[in-house]
Amino acid sequence: MVSQSRHLNEKINIAIDGPAGAGKSTVARMVAKALSYVYVDTGAMYRAVTWVMLKSGISPEDEQQVLQTAQNLVIDLIPSEEGQKVLVDGKEVTREIRSLEVSSQVSRYAQIEGLRSLMVTLQRQMALRKGVVMDGRDIGTTVLPDAEVKVFMTADAAERARRRYLELKDTTNVSLEQLERDITERDRLDAGREISPLRQADDATLLDTTQMSIEEVAEAIVSMCRLYGMERSKG
Ligand code: C5P
């Protein structure tokens, strides 16, 4: 278990970015728990929108239609004992948004500028009261450039595919090779897009987690937060 934190009387925001499958969401959830903060999985928001578009037959090329539909959606991220629940217009889609189909299409919708503005506005609102651990691709660079602690988490692509595989193997029959292809392709699209590409913010701390356990990574981030709190209380 990650140790509980002292020295953080005033709440801060924590931004965790990085490529697909680096373990960001697991770590972000652990950090949020250790600090009694709120976890916001921004990838789940893009996935929820993608799920709706695929279901409604709206292609990413039809930007007008994507925007019009997305504007009217209500996306809720609800913390629960089994992890975060994702609801679209009141319907739970927690499992559906993790499907290979959504995973393979999400980066195409996430390139749409208007959709990103919509998501960024919602995400900033969620972080207004501080005490948020937010993970994604553009949190440190675009969504919360003033976040007090910023981390860019990476790991080798093969290791990232292995981690995703362990997560999914009991519920889907996806192969390791397929996951590695999916992850590499998503990274290519996410890092290559024009608007808010996946990039390490200049003031983010790089954590290469290839050789680290998930607990070690979470502990490292909680320590950074504690250090920040200590520095701040010194004035
Ligand atoms: O984090 P996750 O892998 O679930 O994210 C799914 C996809 O959503 C990413 O591959 C990316 O295309 C998009 N995304 C994004 N910006 C974010 C979070 C996710 O573009 N802040």
Image (cartoon, rainbow, N blue to C red):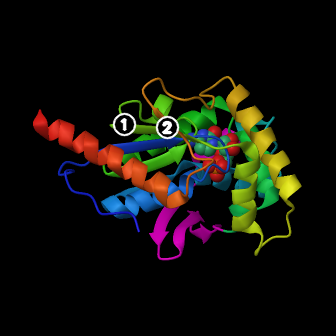
- 10 Å crowding of disc 1: few (<14), some (14-19), many (20+): many
Q: Quadrant of the N terminus?
A: bottom left
Mark 2: is the Cβ under 8 angstroms from ligand 1?
yes
Q: Which residue is mark 2?
A: 139
Q: Is residue 167 above or below residue 202?
A: below
Res 189 seen here: yes
Badge 2 amino acid: Ile
Residue 109 image-quadrant placement: top right
Image coordinates for residue 192, horizontal then vertical, percent: 72, 26
For label 2, the crowd category at 10 Å Cα-Cα, with few meaning under 14, some 14 to 19 and many 20 or more, is many
> In this figure, which residue is indicated by the disc labeled 1?
147
When the figure is inspected, residue 62 is found, relative to residue 33, above or below; the finding is above
Vertical relation: 209 (above or below) 204:
below
Q: Is residue 92 magenta?
A: yes
Q: Disc 1, disc 2: CB below 8 Å?
A: yes
Residue at (81% x, 49% y) in the render = 180
Q: Is residue 54 left or right of residue 33?
A: right
Could you say which is closer to the camera, residue 99 or residue 124?
99
Farthest residue, direction front: 211
Q: Which residues are magenta?
A: 66-94
Whether residue 53 is visible here, answered yes or no, is: no
Residue at the (39%, 58%) spot, across then down: 32
Tell me which numbered mark, 1 or 2, is placed earlier along the sequence.
2
Element at label 1: loop
- What is the C-alpha distance between the residues marked 1 and 2? 9 Å
Classify the position of ligand 1 by quadrant: top left, top right, bottom left or bottom right.
Answer: top right
Observer-nearest residue: 77 or 59?
77
Kind of residue at badge 1: Ala
Q: Which quarter shows the C terminus?
A: top left
Cβ of mark 1 under 8 Å from ligand 1: the answer is: no
